[in-house]
Amino acid sequence: MRSVPEDRDGTSDDAEDALGGGTGNGDEDLRDRVERLHAELEATAELPVERTASRWIGEAEAVAGDAATADLGPAVRRERIEHVVELLSNVDGTGDERADEHVARARELATAVVEDDSDPAADR
């Protein structure tokens, strides 16, 4: 069973910490944030998610996993996460409160990665 460590209130510190933006560590920080995004999506795998939502989340998880682990430059990594944002925009709800929370945090993380212009390693 795949899971994301949770606080007592059921939230993931990883997701909350990653929203702070870049720390000046360039691609390493970006990769860490993308790994956190992937973990949020991965955490929905064992939850009872509605079929259509599961398809979109699964695709977003695969793209995020590739972005987290593949040898990519910052611009390509961000481009992949832009695709994750698009995929997650198709998820209106999952039918499971815990999965909804993971998807909401994943959306926040993905949006923060895409909108972060503070990273000097970004090839934009």
Image (cartoon, rainbow, N blue to C red):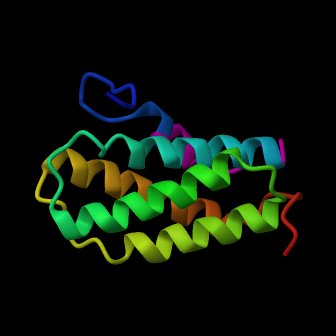
Height in image: 90 above or below 48?
below
Residue 52 at x, y = what percent? 22, 70
Residue 30 at x, y = what percent? 72, 49
Residue 104 at x, y = what percent? 33, 57
Left or right of 13 in this view: 82: right
Q: Quadrant of the C terminus?
A: bottom right
Residue drawn at 49 percent across, 35 percent down = 14
Residue drawn at 68 percent across, 71 percent down = 79
Q: Is residue 20 magenta?
A: yes
Residue drawn at 32 percent across, 24 percent down = 7
For residue 83, what is the image quadrant? Answer: bottom right
Left or right of 46 in this view: 97: left
* Span of residues in magenta: 15-26
Q: Quadrant of the N terminus?
A: top left
Residue 109 in view, yes or no:
no
Residue drawn at 60 percent across, 65 percent down = 81
Left or right of 21 in this view: 45: left
Left or right of 25 in this view: 109: left
